[in-house]
Amino acid sequence: MTYEQAASTIAERFSGVTVETGAPLIVSVPVDQWRAFAQFAKESLGCRFFNFLSAVDWKDGGLEVVAVVDNLDDNVSLRLKTRLAPSPAEAGHDEAPRCASLVPVFRGANWMERECYDMFGIVFEDHPDLRRILLGDDWQGHPLLKSYAVDTPHPPYR
Amino acid sequence: MIDTAVQSQVAIDYSAGERLTMNMGPQHPSAHGVFRAILTLEGETVVGVDAVIGYLHRCHEKLAETLTYAQYPSIASKTDYVAAMTSEFAYVLAAEQIGVVDVPKRAQYIRVIAAELQRIASHLLWLGTWCMDMGGALGGGATVFLYCIRERELILDLFESLVGARLLYGLFQVGGVRYDLPDGWPQQCRDTLATIEQRLIEYERLLEDNPFFLARARGVGFITRELAEDVGVAGPLLRGSGVNFDLRRNLPYSSYGDFTFSVPVEPEGDCFARYRVRMVEFRQSIAIVRQALDRLPDGPISSRPALKSVAQIRIQKGEAYARVEGPRGEVGCYLIADGSPKPYRMKWRGASFSNLSVLPHVLPGHKVADVVAIMGSVDPVFGEVDR
Amino acid sequence: MPAWLVAALAAFAVLNVVLVIVTYVTLLERKFAARMQTRIGPYRVGPHGLLQPIADAVKLVMKEDIVPDAADRPVYNLAPIVFLIPCMLIFATIPFAPGLGVADLNIGILFFLAVSAMEIVGLFMAGWGSNNKYALLSAMRAVNQIISYDLPFIFSALVPVLLTGSLRLSDIAAAQSGLWFVFYPVIGQLAFLFFVISTLAAENRVPFDILEAESELVAGFRVEYSGMKFAIIQLGEYAHMVGSSFLGALLFLGAWSGPGPEWLGPIWFLIKAMLVFLLVTWVRWSFVRIRVDQILTLSWKLLLPATLLLLATTAVVIVWRTSGLT
Amino acid sequence: MAVKAPIPEVPAPVWRSFKDLQEFEALRQQRPEGDKHSATFESLTEGIHQFPGGFVVTTLADTFFNWARKSSVWPVTFGLACCAIEMMATFASRFDVERLGMVPWASPRHSDLMIVSGTVTIKMAPMLERIYAQMPDPKWAVSMGSCANSGGPFRHGYHVVKGVDRVIPVDVYVPGCPPPPESLLNGLLLLQEQIAHFRRTGQRAAPNEKVD
């Protein structure tokens, strides 16, 4: 399984997916095919190693969820990206961005997705236990959004 | 006299059948740091684990967006403060991959020497704190702990003469290394490695001939190969569960390809397998440092020599995910640059975060005493877990 | 002088001697452990750290005495005393020299073993009284560990009794003037080995110290005690340790028999007791703690049958030796 | 099947609202109303002190008890972050603190010194307060490392408390990031000196005047 074979199998199986060839294969996936693609990557591409899952806040361009999965035996690394709606803090509407959770596919995604929820406010559908992991449960706001100032006061300690 | 009636009266309710919820709280004598495990016990066996982390969340990723490429490496070393060298390595490597900055050969060799010495020091601390967990701070474990710290001090002296700091260094910068090896350092380094190699044989005799240690380590904390890959566990835990993957050999970076070393793999996946993997890694790191010292090339130590001051480094738009093999596993830095002197987004993939997230899947069914032994063999560092 | 006054004075003297020995035994252990770990123990407090135990004791006395609100007050306050009494009583029957002892009962060793099993009551009271999960869990562990190790402790202590044929401790000591029981061909060494293992477990020293396992149960049953009560519990623990090492020296190493004049007896006895104590400390600082279930399996499946077998073989050997002679 | 533990609500202790150390000293000396024993103890020492020649007794008692407290300060094992590794190196064989009579104990009840080594985050602050409150009096606190002194390199982080003296009263500040074992030992010796100058039993030494 080399990068070219991986790119070709992806191209024929998934239509809406754009692939950027290169050492790590960067694949941008539409939101609705997110879990299906992850399942496909795990089974047929052999990318069983779940490296990490995180998010990037592109302000108006919306939130982008990034996940890296690897095939350890053939050293193939896949970087999956999907673009969500902008976070409520910027775009003004109150409904939080939603994304399909990868926990049914990779058990390692449990804590990573809780951290994304904690830091960006992305709600992952049918995640077994979606609550804040790093900050206290009574924390307001999601710190890693660009609209959140780095030095916001937090009584009574700051 | 300050009023001590501070905490509210918490009555222990024994009504919920024989299940007891016990709190292995953030202030924990085992020296890993601030981690709270809410264990649901049935008698002595653990039934459920709810791990509460975040007590050391120091906003690394938000601060990375406000600090320039020259400032952040000094804070990057505080993510995994037991292996500060490899933490800085990841950030600097990512910045160099985006900015296509070439690093002179001598700087790459010094980086490899520093990273491998740091791996030996970190594994020494792991062996000490693991035995202290199992043996007690006022018991047998403390003896092994103090022996390991005695060896670790030798390596910290080496780093002190190289960089000037004992625990958190500023050796790495974008484009190379900040300090060159002082004269007489290679010889001092070889002597230290020789003494450590002798002492390792002593530790193995002290621990592996001791039936109590074997009873506590063997057959405890099984991580199957499938669970290891599924959760993204890395480093000695992955190799302890039979996966033959090491970043230094599979995806060589910073001229690791020039050195010959073997990657230890143990199929069982219990605490003793991880212990064996790390003991072999000690010897492989010593071999790598010796090869690097023998073939150390001359030349400049940084491709951007004017970088001594906090000069502005501008890196053009782009993104990169640099992966470094730290003592606890794969330390990754996913960096997005937008041409300004500060990165747009920096995601830190800490090895301990994924290693720790395997605990709720492994712990149920073990005794309370095993919980501590397994956490010791996972060797989490909470600067890296909470970032 | 009326008999009861002599007994009272003897008891008072022995109590003070024991207190001094116990405080300075803690310093001996800290210095010995430090030397094992390539460091210098307490050094700055008085010449070579000799005043360290006094400083610790005085500081603990002057500490604030915290009683947690949720604690069961009478049980909590009484526990240290109930824990200390048996640990001090065990010195009553130990004869430090042929005539020098508080009470030389004819059932000396039986009294010793019975009283040393009583300390578990104080320990459980401490565990239950402080209404703290850690304390409760460690009290549970304490009960089943100490009870399951009392039997091997008693059986291994009975081997010298069988060899001398009397329960009186001074008889046992006198019988060893020729051959120390530890040098008795096979039975002596095995009995001494089992005795040391079960004393280790009876006082929850490492490797059996799951009671106050720092990494799991923070500080075991004494987690809620501070200041004076904590000092009493520490005192009781070390007193029980020293009492068992005195008993070990008496049963197996021939209490006061040794070269030199007669009045050197107690000095020899003290040196032998300290040797046994250092053996226990050496084990404490080099072994890793083992799990609860492994401790219990070791006791019920290994130690108990072994000591029973040993007792039976000593009886057979004695009968064979005596019948062979007549 | 995670069991959600209720987060116990911890009322803020009395010293939260102090402006600076002088005001804190005033707060510190007030005896809470329910505390009748030490009131009598207070009047007793006052009586002896006024008694002609009585000061010899009180000063002798002070020096003796201060010597005892100074020479057996027991720190609680409370490592937070990178400074905890340096604290362990200080407790280890090369820079042995047991020479000064310090043995790290596991439970706050048995110890009388808290070395805050590492960054105090907002999620950890209530726990830190509770552990400090659980320690019996007289107790001291050493703030080790620039994170504990003033928030250090993470001062501008949203989750970091800008210095541990916003949470508990601190006696000795040890600078450095992380402070090498020698400077922590220097801090501990300073603490011992401060304990030695404990005026009148039960009272804490007044801090030096505010120098702006």
Image (spheres, rainbow, N blue to C red):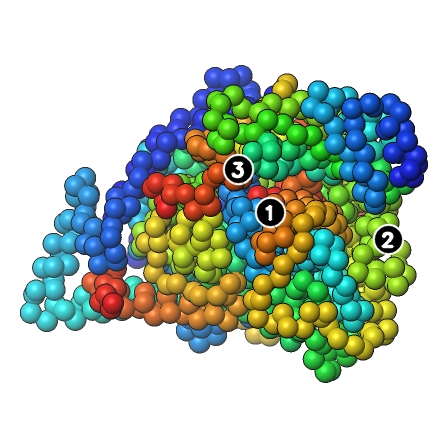
Q: What residue would you read off at disc 3?
A: A145
Secondary structure at numbered mark 3: loop
Disc 3: which chain?
A
- Count the labels in the image: 3
> Does residue C282 sit above or below A130 in this rendering?
below
Secondary structure at numbered mark 2: helix
Q: Nearer the viewer, mark 3 or mark 2?
A: 3
Q: What residue would you read off at disc 2?
A: B249
Residue B242, by quadrant, is top right
Whole-angstrom CA distance, mark 1 to mark 2, is 31 Å
> Does residue C151 sit above or below D1 in this rendering?
below
Q: Is residue B167 left or right of residue C76?
A: right
> Does residue C256 sit above or below B297 in this rendering?
above
Q: Is residue B56 left or right of residue D14?
A: right
Residue C39 picture location, percent across and down: 59, 69
The residue located at (43%, 47%) in the rendering is A151
Q: What residue would you read off at disc 1?
A: B344
